[in-house]
Image (cartoon, grey):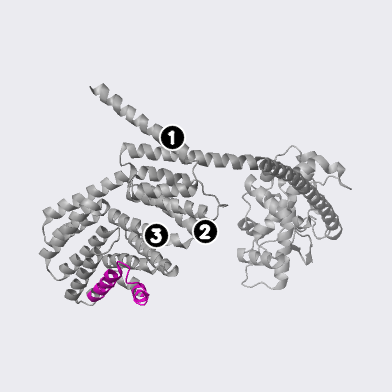
Amino acid sequence: MVIAMVLVATLAVMAEDVTFLNNRRQWEALPTLQLMQMGGDFMNIKNMPDSAMLCYSIVANRYNENLQGDELKSTIRAHCWIGIIYFNLFVNYAEGYKYLLKAQDLAEKHHYDDFLPNIFSSLGNFYWLQSGFKRVDQFDKEALDYHKKSFWKTIEIKKYDEIPTDLINLIYIAFETGELMQIATEREIYSRLPIPDSSGLKFAAEAMSEGVELFSKGHLEQALESFRHALNESKTSSSFNTKSLQVMFDMCIYKTLLQLSRDDDALAILEQAKEVVENNLPEVIPGIYEELAKYYIRQHNQALADQYELLWRRSTDSIAQASQASNVATVRFLHEIDKMNEEQQALALKQRHDRQMLWVVSIAALIAIVMLVLLYLSRKRIQQGYRTIYQQNVELLAAEDARQQETRAEQLKETTIETPKYSHNQMDEDVMDELWQQIVHLMQTSDEIYQDAFSIERLCDILGAKRAYVSQTINTKAGGTFTTLLNEYRIREACRRMNDTENFGQYTIEGIANSVGYSRSYFVRIFKESTGIPPSAYMKLAKAGNADLPNADPQPSRHQLTRGQHLSSSVGFQVGREHCEITNLAEKIP
C-alpha cells in the first residue's frame, strides 16, 4: 500500500513536470501581449498564480534595450507582477524585492512613470513589514520614503483617484512611528487636490487626516470619532485591500483608546484586529502580537506579555522560513522558473558572444601588439637614459678630479688638525670659514667616513668642535645637513668604485654599499635619488661599456687616489668659497 502511494505521488510530480515543460514550450511561441492577457486571467479569474508566474517570466525575459511601445511596457509590467506574486503569494520577500527593484530601474530608465506609484507603494509595504519582523528603525524610514515617492509620483501623473490610498499609507506609518511632522506637507497638499468623489477612499483619507490632527492636539474624543468614521468609509469602498485598511484604522482607534485610558475597549479592538489578520493577512500577524505584548506589559501582566513575545518570535521565524521555501511544490516550480530564465539568458549571451567574438579577439590582439611595442620602446628609452646618465656621471667625475688637481693641490696637502679652538660662544665669519675648511679636508682625506658608524658626533670629536658649531657651519656653507653632505661624498665614492672595474669589478651591490658605509636597501634608494639611475644599472654599464665610452679611461677609486687627488666637493655643495654647479644627473635625461 505504501509503495503504491509513493508511486502515485512520484507519477503526480512527473506529470506536473511534463505539464510545465509542455506549457513552457507552447507559451514561449506566443506573442507578448497574449501572454500578458493570459497572466492576468490566471491571476484574477482562475486563481492560478503558478501559471501566471510562468507567463510573466517568459515576457520578462524578453526584455532588451531595443524594445519599444507595448512590447517594452509589457516586459516592465511583467517584472512588477512577478515581484507582487513572489511577495504576496509565494511569501518570498527576497525575490519579490529583487524584481520590484528591477521594475523600478526599468520604468525610470525608459520614463514609464505610470508604473512607478504601484512599484514605490509595494516597496514601501515591503520595508514596513520588514520593520515589524526585525525591529529596525531604518526600515520605518525607508517605508515612509517610498510611500512619499508614490504620493508625489501619483500627483505628477495626475491619477487623483489613487492618491487617497497613498495618503492613508503615509498617515498610518507616520502615526505609528510618531513622525507626523514628516508628512505635514503631503497632508496640506492633499487638501487642495481635485480628488473626485467617485474615489472610494476619498472620505476615509480625509477623516483619517483629521483624526491624526486632532490626536496631535490632544482632542482625543474627536480624534476617536474621526478614526471610526474613516473605518466606516473604508468598508463601503470597493478597494481590494479592505482588510488591510480595516486593520490600519483599528490600530489608530486602539492607540487613541489607550491614550484615553480605556484599556478594556482598546484590548477589544486589538483582539478584533488579531482575528482579521490571522484569517486574511498572515504577514501582519507579528505586528499584532508585538502590540499585544506591549499591552500586557502596560497591564503588568508579565505572563501574557511573555506569551505574546514568544508568539511574535515564532511568527517572524515562520514567515522567514516561508520566505525561503513555503512548500516542496513551490520550491520545485520556482526552480524550474529559474532554470528557464537561466537558459534564456545563456542563449542571449551566446548570441551576443558569437557576434562580438571576432571583434574581441581582434581588439585584444591589437592591444597586445601595441603593449609589446610600447614596452619595447619604453625599455629601450630607459636603457638609453641610464647610459646617458652613466656617461655624464663619468665625465663629471673626471672633470671634477682634473679641476681639483689644478686648483686645490696646495690647500689639500696633509696637515694636522689643531687642538679644539671653537669653544667660545659665538662664531664669526673667519672662524666659520676655518672650521669649514677643516670639515672639507677631513671628508676628502679620511677613510673613516665610509664606516657605517661614522656620525656627526665622531666628526666633532676629530675636529674638537661643538656639535652646534659644526651643524651651523655645514648648514651655512653647504646648504644642507651633515647626513646630506656625508651621503654626497659616499655616493660619489661608490660611483668611482663601480667605475674602477679593475679593482672593484668583483664586488656586488651589497659589497659596494658596505664598503662606503651603507646597508644594501638604503644604498639602493639613496643612490637612485642622487644619480637618477639604479646602482645595478650603473654597475652593469660600468662593467660592460667603459671601453666603449668616449674618452672613458677607468676612473680610480678613492683608494687608488693620492691624498692630493681627493674630491674637494660633492654634488650641489659649496667647497670653501667655491660652488660646484653639478645638478642631479636624472634631470639630464633627454
Q: Which residues are magenta?
A: 185-214
Look at label 1 and name its amino acid: Asn
Q: Which residue is mark 1?
A: 22
Location of the N terminus by quadrant is: top left
Does 493 appear above or below 426?
above
On whether residue 191 falls in the magenta region, the answer is yes
Q: Main secondary structure of the magenta part?
A: helix
The percent position of residue 558, horizontal first and vertical second, equals: 77, 48
Q: Is residue 419 magenta?
A: no
Quadrant into which the C terminus falls: bottom right
Q: Which residue is mark 3?
A: 118
Residue 533: % across, % down: 73, 50
| Labels 2, 1: front one | 1
Secondary structure at badge 1 equals helix
Identified at 39% across, 59% down, the residue is 118
Task: Name the secondary structure under disc 3.
Answer: helix
Q: CA distance from mark 3 to mark 2?
A: 16 Å
Which residue occupies the foreground of this view, 63 or 378?
A: 63
N-term mark: 2 or 1: 1
* Amino acid type assigned to the residue bearing label 3 in the image: Asn
Crowding near the residue tagged with mark 1, few <14, some 14–19, many ≥20 C-alpha atoms within 10 Å: few
Q: Residue at x 36, y 66 (%)?
A: 162
Task: Name the residue located 34 percent from the left edge and 50 percent from the top edge.
Answer: 44
Q: Horizontally, is 500 left or right of 425 in the view?
A: right
Residue 109 - label: 2
